Amino acid sequence: MSNNIVIAIDGYSSCGKSTLAKALAKKLHFIYIDSGAMYRAVTLYFLRNNIDLKDHEQITDALKNIHLNFHSRDYQTHITLNDEEVSEEIRQMPVSDNVSDVAALREVRHEMVKQQQRMGRSKNIVMDGRDIGTTVFPEATLKIFMTADPKIRAERRYKELHEKNPDITLEEVFENIAHRDYQDTTRAESPLVRAPDAIILDNTNMTPDQQLQFALDKVNTNK
Ligand code: DC
């Protein structure tokens, strides 16, 4: 039995999971791991190399050529794909539009889960994603399942994206979120589902500070 602490934060797209996970990791001096960034980096590689998502052999071969690494600076996610910093590019629409198809592939999930479990084996971590409390770390010390009104989520995401991409519309962002919710909850492999022992955090009307306090209270009552 390992003695390290794992905090699993799962939930819908653009719910503020990473904001909470980063703040919590910082406060507790844990390592923060953004599992979605890993699926995004794989998607970027697949797009650049025109990988056919129906060709399982191509997918397996491609995965062997993908090397991902996290570099944590100030609790911001810096991810490299074969030594190239891709943290910005993985947030752009081409990746966002394709990532749920890639994340639904059995071969991709199998490889990512293996890497994620390795990262959490001996360190105290906060990891956010969709299947962290169910598949990656079913024995996690604390599990939080985040949700919020889809309209509010779209508005928050639009504000972020609009700064870098003024052409983007709120409708586009809303549709992307709705599509990803559908894909994430209905896929055959590890669909997004609340672990029975996960605590629900609906942050529709909560500030980031209130969410952090909520999570810290749960950490303290879990001790
Ligand atoms: O959290 P995010 O929006 O960056 O995640 C990108 C995509 O990856 C999203 O469509 C769901 C998927 N994902 C997943 O299937 N499992 C995870 N543990 C994390 C993300």
Image: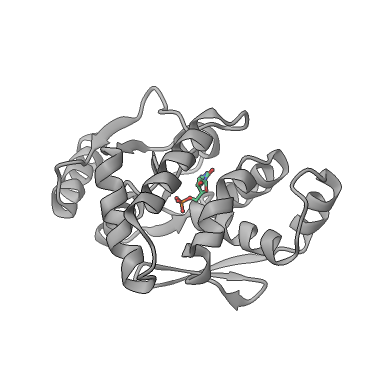
Between 172 and 26, the one lying in front of the other is 172
Residue 106, image x, y percentages: 69, 38
Residue 151 quadrant: top left
Q: Residue placed at 26% from the left, 52% from the top?
A: 155
Between 143 and 97, the one lying in front of the other is 97
Residue 198, image x, y percentages: 35, 30
> Can the viewer see residue 101?
yes
Please say if 115 is above or below 221: below
Residue 148 quadrant: top left
Between 86 and 101, the one lying in front of the other is 101
Residue 204, image x, y percentages: 20, 41
Locate residue 10 relative to residue 102 in the image: left or right: left
Q: Which residue is at the far top?
A: 196
Query: How many numbered discs?
Result: 0
Residue 33 quadrant: bottom left
> Can the viewer see residue 25?
no
Please say if 222 is above or below 210: above
Q: Residue placed at 27% from the left, 62% from the top?
A: 159
Residue 70, image x, y percentages: 52, 67
Q: Residue placed at 74% from the left, 47% from the top?
A: 53
Locate residue 71 relative to residue 52 in the image: left or right: left
Q: Which residue is at the far bottom?
A: 84
Between 100 and 20, the one lying in front of the other is 100
Screen quadrant of the C terminus: top left
Locate residue 59 relative to residue 76 in the image: left or right: right
